[in-house]
Amino acid sequence: MRYSALLILSLCLFCGCQKVISVHLDPGATQYVIEGVVTDQPGGSSVSISQTKDFSGNNTFAGVSGAAVTISCGGASYALSESSPGVYANGMLTGVPGNTYSLNVVLDGHTYTASSTMPNPVVGIDSIYVRTGVLTDKKYVTVVYTDPAGIPNYYRWVQYVNGRKEKTNFFGNDEFTDGLTIRAQLDFNNDTNDPNRDIKTGDSVRIDMINIDSAVYQYWFALQQNADGSGQSASPANPTGNIAGGCLGYFSAQGVRTKGLMVGKE
Amino acid sequence: MRVSFFITGLLSLAAMLTSTRGYTQRLEDVKISLRLNHASMTEALRAIESKTPFKFLARAEDVEPLRDITLTVKDQPVADVLPTLFKGRHLQYKQVGVNIILKKATSNIEGGDNDAMPVKFKAAVKFAVSGTVRSAGTGETVLGATIRIGEPSAGTVTNEYGFYSLTLPSGRSYRMTVSAVRFKTRELEFTLTSDLVQNIKMEEEVKDLQQVTVTASSSGRSLQSPQMGLEKLNIREANKIPVIFGEKDILKTIQLLPGIKSAGDGNSGFYVRGGAADQNLILLDEAVVYNPSHLLGFFSTFNSDAIKNIDVYKGGMPAQYGGRLSSVVDVKMNDGNNKTYGVNGGIGLISSRLTAEGPIQPDKSSFLVSGRRTYADVFLKLSSDSNVNKSRLYFYDLNAKANYSFGDKDRLYLSGYFGRDVLAQGNTVGINWGNTTATLRWNHLFNTRLFSNTSLIYSNYDYKIHINQDGNNFDIFSQIRDWNLKEALQWYVSSKNTVSVGLDAIFHTIRPGEITANGADAGVNSIALQRRYSLESSVYATDTWKASDRFSLTYGLRVSAFSVLGKGDYYEFNANGQVIDTLHYRSGQVVKTYVNPEPRIAVSYQLNPTTSLKASYVRNTQNLHLISNSTTNSPTDKWVANTNVIKPEISDQWALGYYKNLAENKYELTVETYYKTMQNQIDYRNGANIFTNKPIESELLFGRGRAYGIEWLLRKKIGRLTGWVSYTLSKTERQINGINNDRWYNARQDRTHDIAIVGIYEINKKWSFSADWVFYTGDAVTFPNGKYRVGGDVYFYYTNRNAYRMPNYHRLDFSFTKQLKKTRRFSSELVFGVYNAYGRKNAYQIDFRQGKADPNITEAVQTSLFSFVPSISYNFKF
């Protein structure tokens, strides 16, 4: 009796029961999605344009060609040309921390504009290590970095395991940690139970630490909180990006630093 | 025989105490001899009283000035003596039983030959019969007991301390009927010749299955009272209704009543008439319980063993209640047995309970202590998984109450609640949270018609988070704390009017969040968000007027004032929620005061002895708002008070009701319909972050709401089979600029249909069976219309707010109760239950995600919590 009760209890309280269901979702009008980045790394700057599609469609998003894309900074202006369908780039454009960049996209007669300032200084990673998390036996990467005191800083981290990008968004700011040396554990929930997402001994792990500005941080925060499809969100909504003109997406001038390691035995 | 004239300060009424007489003599039949020589009228009347069975009732000021009376009569009828005595002295008289009531003559008939009063004269002399109604077995006060006088028709109901007072014409005999749910109806006779204290003891009803008496009054519902939108829950009945894990839970049980809607499995929150979960005022012995849930919402904080009574007001709230828009859930704790010591308790799958009670002064005062603790953590320790066995997960409650009587007029009550939840993993991460309340009350009876209660109330909710993991070592603390002083007076003016007046002042201190770094290398900076102070005060007055046997009216006004106080910084914002100005305030300085008059009116009209119609209007305001951006309740949800920007929420509710007792009062039918508007409703900007030290106003949007619906309840309260069927048809919408293109949209709690069927069947003396079935339309939710790619990953594209529905919810629960050994000293029972008996997989939440099997598609995933949960529990009492 006791054990069956415990079993029922733990099943119900801790696991719940999940099943894939079919939900009829009305198709909405399509919108453009503009994702523009200027980084301080050579070749890291590009603008990609795609469109929303129906929920029932596949996850291949075709690029949108035919846009006129320019990024300017001070007096300098860079025209970006389409390097592959929907992806626009200019190899000459490498961002400089502290500079403000403006994006101008003309598409189908509509103009979309945005600006973003690359944080200065660009904060790098002091070290990274891998360790087992709390309430789980899975391994997670911890990023150690030192936040500069006295200025607001916003960060994003992108994790690659064996070259494969983890889909979870990791981000943080220094609202409560200004000027400290911080150990940020990049926790994520492997909700798809994909073994390739888990970190195992022998894996190669790479972390990009991306310094972003306040508006872009707010975009990623809202994207994660309200648009990742979680039923926990009381008010799912499209995040408000920093691009004017009526589209989804964001424009970010960002400083990027990278560190990698091979996962050894703990 | 005691005869006297005495002067009371206020009314100067002459009065006396008499024994009851079956037969009253006529003035014509009683003969008297008198010899008065320059006597006063007082002496004359005393002389008549001493020689006859009659007594005089008069105002002293009418009688005392009359002097110098000389009169001699021999063996004459009193009927002849009185006109002679009063002639020219401006006095009229009337016989009422043994009493002779004297009244100063009115001018138009002054000096007339006939000093007998005109026929239309109504006895001006009235007295109050008052007292406290208690259970004969335990001495517990009986709340809401109905007191009725047959002829002339009059009635009242005991208040929250079991007190009643009824003012009636004097000099008559009355038959009083006292009835209350689960007590045998009592009848008493008395003759009223002065204010009378009549304390009443009621025997508990013993359930006799063979013989079932049906009385209208035992239903506990008043057709006459203008109060509507009130649901009373009988704890004994509630305890028979099946619940998950066999954990009795009054907050879950009230959700089976119409207009009170469950926030879903694993959530003790509820929605009343379209209101949000934070718009319910939940009181435990008058103290506000800010977070009424345990274990992240799976259970409520109320331990049924300690609870006497629960009233839920969905509308037409009496003027003494205020501070929340949608409902008042008024929970009263047991006082404890003042006759004998007793212990009762129970052992269930989730928790064990133990209650001890007994007298302090026998028959006068008592105490009660009740505790409950879960033991899931004991099971967790058995696990071989080190992650699980290091976990701590439990909650406990402690309820305590004592009362002490200082004579007949004064009584002190002290009651308290302390509860805590603990959820932790070893020493690395943990959260604990809970409520503490304490209430000190002083009941004082100024006189038989004026009842006073003074309360000093403390209420606290806080949570603490501890993190000590991998170089991060800090604590987070947040708290809301109230000190509350209340004074309430109930004045039983006459048999037609009852007046309540009172005042209420609450000082709120909110500590929104404080981070304390432990050690030099804590990984965070210590930061304390500014404390928020406010004073919420209100005064009210209300009168219940029984205009006629059919028509009653309650009208009143509550005026609430909410002052936002310094010290602290307050901000001005632009339309985008960005700070444009910062205002600094000194300690105690008033930032802003919001004053809101809240009129309340309710009328009832009784069409016939079994049918009545009622209508009401009520305005409520709410000055504290719960900020939560998750669909489920969390211990870290924040209460915020009004600021210069956050304004009081205001609701106006109009309701109409039809009440009918059917089949010789075996069934009760209630139909109520309502329309409610709400102002200054709060929602969140897209991407709102509530865990920030930025001003919270920058994350909020304000708008309005409206709700309307009709509620049906057919209830059977008598017989082997009891229970009810409830059905609600309703609509709830919101309109907030900045959301859904500024158009009206369904609130999340908008539920078109909501049905509950509850049955309790007494099979025989040993076994009883109960079952409930619920069905409701799924919540209004926002689902994506499309998807797009950002940063190489799929995100979802939304158009309209809350344009979709969760799947419909339905569920059947049942339980069997077996009465085990029952002696005079000891009784026990076993309860077997099944929650969600047919295993319906109800949606707890629906997530959208990239396909698990095929990453090139997106899929919808439904999570369900409870399907088919059996339970067993054992309860005892000795």
Image (cartoon, helix red, strand yellow):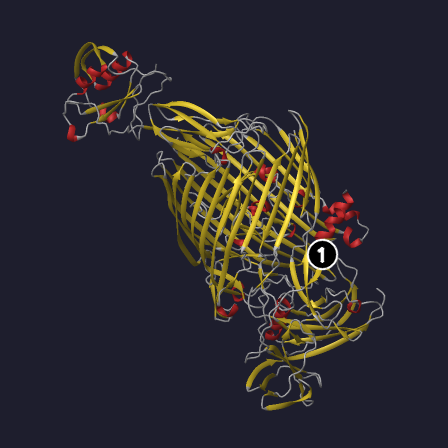
Amino acid residing under circle 1: Cys
Q: Judge whether A151 appears above or below B846 on screen.
A: below
Q: Is residue B52 left or right of residue B733?
A: left
Q: Is residue B330 left or right of residue A254?
A: left
Quadrant in the picture for the C terminus of chain B: top right
**SS category of the residue bearing label 1:** strand
Identify which residue, B847 or B462, lies in the foreground.
Answer: B847
From the image, tell me which residue sits under label 1. Answer: A17
Identify which residue, B620 or B115, lies in the foreground.
Answer: B115
Identify which residue, A193 or B217, lies in the foreground.
Answer: B217
**Residue B264 image position (x, y, % from top left):** 61, 53
- Residue A256 lies in quadrant: bottom right
Q: Judge whether B447 appears above or below A107 on screen.
A: above
Q: Is residue A185 left or right of residue B534?
A: right
Q: Chain of mark 1?
A: A
Please report the residue visible at 23 percent of the width from the left and 11 percent of the height from the top.
B32
**Residue B274 image position (x, y, % from top left):** 51, 55
**Residue A218 image position (x, y, % from top left):** 60, 71
